[in-house]
Amino acid sequence: MKAKFAIHPLQIDIINEAFRPNEKEIQFAQGLVAAFEEAMKQGKAAISYENKMCDVPVYKRMVNLLKRAGLR
């Protein structure tokens, strides 16, 4: 889910908190993005990170996660 509708201004902080990535997600994304960017310098388009196959769509999703967290 990427969006939520608020009917009252007091709901905004609650909604923002619900959509903010947690620390575990942020750490995973930071590590994956760093590893993937290093791999791209070597001409690779996919990597294995923490026993997970990661390609360009996964990389882009993690970059977007970091943007939502205000880290990019």
Image (tube, helix red, strand yellow):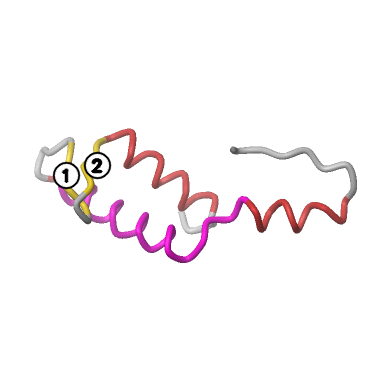
User: Does residue 61 appear left or right of residue 39 in this picture?
Assistant: right
Up-down: is 47 above or below 66?
Answer: above
- In the image, what residue type sits under mark 1? Ile
Residue drawn at the location 78% of the way across and 38% of the way down: 5
The spot of residue 20 in percent (x, y) is 59, 55
Q: Secondary structure at mark 1?
A: strand
Residue drawn at the location 15% of the way across and 45% of the way down: 41
- In the image, what residue type sits under mark 2? Cys
What residue is shown with label 1? 47
What residue is shown with label 2? 54
Q: Nearer the viewer, residue 39 or 1?
A: 1
Q: Quadrant of residue 59?
A: top left
Residue lying furthest left in this view?
Answer: 42
Q: Which residues are magenta?
A: 19-39
Q: Contact, CB < 8 Å: mark 2 with mark 1?
A: yes
Is 33 in the magenta?
Answer: yes
Up-down: is 57 above or below 8?
Answer: above
The label shown at residue 32 is none
The spot of residue 4 in percent (x, y) is 72, 39
